[in-house]
Amino acid sequence: MSGKTIILTGDKISLQSILGENITDEYVSWLNDREVIRFSNQRFVQHSKESCLDYAQSFLGTDNLFLSVKENQSGQIIGSITAYLNLHHCTADMGLMIGDRSVWGNGYGLEAWLLLMRYLFDTAKIRKITGGTLRDNISMIKIMERSGMQLEAIRKEQEVIADVAIDMLLFAKFSDV
């Protein structure tokens, strides 16, 4: 899969390999928006166009995926989704950011998550997909639960937000095949 351009199309969104032109000022602004990244360790980093381009470049020559989430109707990029693959073990760990706050609550995150899961299970022959989030990230927990993932483990008081230690919830789903 390394170096392959991926385009996955759903009802409301499409996922596509991120290229340099997808790293816009708006994209960088999402990574610097404290509300967007409040549950992510990205909150500890000040992002620039260069740092985002470097991150996108880090996927080249690997099996890992860094995809834009694009709204079909408007054609606008509204976020990104990643999958870190270990082909030796046939596993993948996914992450999601819907950066455009104006579209939150419209089901785009769930559709993106399901679309990438289906691709990983069916095309990449992944047998297990994992994802993690903090206990306070209710939206991400709902996405994982609605996608059929099961709570696999809890890392008690793993991370700190506003001086409060919060549990990290780890979810997993196995291929039906």
Image (tube, grey):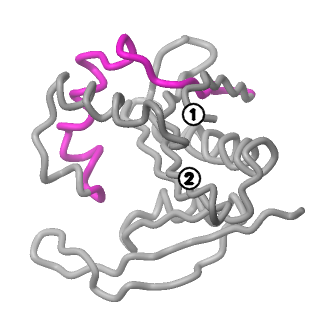
Residue located beneath label 2 in the image = 85
Q: Indicate left or right for 150 with 140 as reference.
A: right
**Residue 113, which numbered label?**
none
Q: Indicate left or right for 53 with 65 as reference.
A: left
The amino acid sitting under disc 1 is Ser
What residue do we see at 29% from left, 44% from top? 36
Q: Which residues are magenta?
A: 11-40
Asked whether 170 falls inside the magenta stretch, the response is no
Q: Is residue 157 above or below residue 13?
A: below
Residue 169 in percent (x, y) is at 45, 76
**Label whose residue precedes the other's in the sequence (1 or 2):** 1
Residue furthest right as drawn: 177
Residue located beneath label 1 in the image = 2
Residue 75 in percent (x, y) is at 54, 11
What residue do we see at 27% from left, 85% from top? 157
Residue 142 in percent (x, y) is at 57, 62
